[in-house]
Each structure stands twice: as C-alpha cells, then as structure tokens.
Amino acid sequence: MKRLDWYILRKFLITFFFVVLILVSVILIITYAERNGSFIEHHIPAHQILGYFLNFAPYIANIITPITVFIAATFVTSRLASHTEIVAILGSGVSYFRFLRPFLLGATVIALVSFVLTGWVIPNANKSRILFELNYFNTGVRKAEKNFHIKVSPVHYVFVNRFNTEKQVGTNFTLEAIENKKLQWKLSGKSIRWDAEQSAWLLKDWNLRTIKGLEEQYLYEPNRDTLLVLNLAPKDFEQAKNMQETLSLDELNDHIDDLRLKGADHTPIFEIERIVRVMSPFTALILTFIGVTLSSKKSRGGVGFQMALGFLLAFIFIILFMTTRSIARAGSGYSVLIIWLPNIIFTILALIIYRLVPK
C-alpha cells in the first residue's frame, strides 16, 4: 500500500473506533443510570454488574455500527475536503475511485470484524446478558405458545391449544397420524401434563378415532390416564425473548433445520435473524461509499453541516432497516428481498451520488 492509502485508512479506522467508544460509553452510562435501582433492589454484586456491561457493550457496538461507520467516513472526508487535500490528491492524477480505495478497504475490515462478532462472539455474550436481564429486569420473560403446531415424526403431528410453562400442562391436545396425505388416526385429550420422572406426557380424558377406508372406529376413555412418549418436551412450548440472538451462526443453522423438521410456526424469526447477519456487513461498505462521495466536495456549511447530513441519512437507514425487519417478521413473504431492501435502496442512492460528485 502507498503512503496515501495508509494515511487515509489510519484516519478512517481511528475515527471509527473513537466514535464507537464514545457512543457506547454514553449508552452504557445511560443504561446504568436507568437500571441502578434494580441493581440496588436485588443486591447484585459489582462483578456481576461489570460482567453484564462487558457483554452488553459489544451488542450495542454492533447495533450502532451503521451510524458510526457513516459518521467516521463523513467526518474524515469532510476534514480532507476542508483542508483542500482532496483537490490536491485528485489534481496529482489520482482517480476518484482510486481515492475511494482506502475507505472501502477500511469498510471491508469493519465488515469482516462485524460478521465474526455477530456470527459467534456476540451470541455467546448474549447468552449471559439475556439471562441476566431475565433474572433481574424481566425483559426476557418466557412466553407460552398458543395454538401450537409441531411435527414430532415424519407422520405424526401435535396440536395444543394452550400450554402453561410453569405448571407444564396443556389443554385441548391432538396427536394425528397422516400418511400419503390421508388421516390414519387421531388421538385427542382434554389435557396433557409433563411427567418429569418418566420423561413422558400424561394424557387425560382422551378419545381415539381410527380410520380404515370408509369405516371409522371410536374409543373413548374419560377416566383413564395414558402415558405418551413423544419427541416433544416442555421447553419446545416456550421461547425466550430474543432467543435467536443467543445462537451462534452454526447453532442458528442447526436450530432452523430442527424447527423446519418439526414444522414450528416461529421458524421465520430465526430465518430472518440469519438473513440479517449475512446482510449487515455489506451495510458498512454501502454507507462508507455514500459518506465519502457525499462529503468529498468542500462545503460552505463546513464539517458540521455534512456531519448533520450524515447523521440524518444513517438514522433514515436504521429506521428503514427496522421497518423492513418488522414487515418480514409479520410473515409477508419474500423475507430475503424485504430484509435486503435498505441495502438495495442505499446502493442505488450511492450510485446516484457517485454520478453527481465532482471528480
């Protein structure tokens, strides 16, 4: 690399990490002030609080990466433009795209680090963070499934109307056997309860319908309890809030395969999480490109105006990203396209700005 590349790359990366450090520090201080009452109320030791914030910091840093990379690119480029350094660089025969190279190289480094963090490091930290919040802040309360459908074998399907995770009791249970798209038999029960000692389910007030061609056999046992051994446990009925954030990329892939095998209704939540982790690193490249091209022209408004514009565009991106993710989670279909929509829109914007910028 030439001296010019090192000069710009060093400025860009140092500014990026400085902005991340400042913003994360501010957010941690605000969070501590908000939750200090809970720390005192639960008599939480100082080392546990410190551990919580050490796990919370990379999570916050990853969330604000789109803003910080945009701010860093805008600030460094604006400073270079205000000192007429960009004019000198381009005047010496360096092409505009060649001028962009160290910025894009720095964005690639940030993107790769972000991918590793979101894929493996942050999920492991989130396991402790979310457990801490579950115990002391009630922000990760477990919820029971309603109208729960799941596939427990290649031909067996379970339906439970409601399941109480504390008592481990479900109501309106149904177990169906379907082969070649035909119902073979259907076992129904008024309630089902988990028997931890026998690792099986206790079915009460049940009836069985068996279909053989045009004939149907019916068996009703209102006063007889029956043990059922199924590929199903109470934990399958509950989902920790933001559980998808606690799984590494490898664990996430395995979990999605397991949910698809069982036909679980909440599979899209984990699929969207995987799409987001793949999509997010590309955001650093796109926003860096926009930040540099937007700020490379010397402005009468100075660095402050361009920084404000950078903040505005970064926040627009964040809002657009959160909106599209909510739409995808609502089950509107085309999740990949919807999640990638902010990057697609800002890529088009980047190309338009690049065409208009003086070179």
Image (cartoon, grey):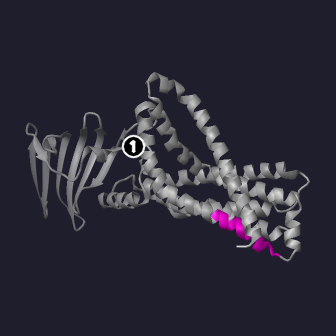
Q: Which residues are magenta?
A: 94-107
Circle count = 1
Q: Nearer the viewer, residue 237 or 217?
A: 237
Residue sitting farthest toward the right: 300
Magenta residues: mostly which secondary structure?
helix
Q: Is residue 97 above or below residue 242?
A: below
Q: Is residue 120 above or below residue 160?
A: below
Secondary structure at badge 1 equals loop
Residue sitting farthest toward the top: 41
Kindly identify the residue that appears in the image at 24 percent across and 56 percent down.
152
In this view of the protein, can residue 216 be seen by the observer?
Answer: yes
Kindly identify the residue that appears in the image at 47 percent across and 58 percent down.
119
Measured as percent of width and height from the top left, residue 125 is found at: 45, 47
Kindly identify the residue that appears in the image at 29 percent across and 53 percent down.
150
Residue type at mark 1? Ala
104 in magenta: yes
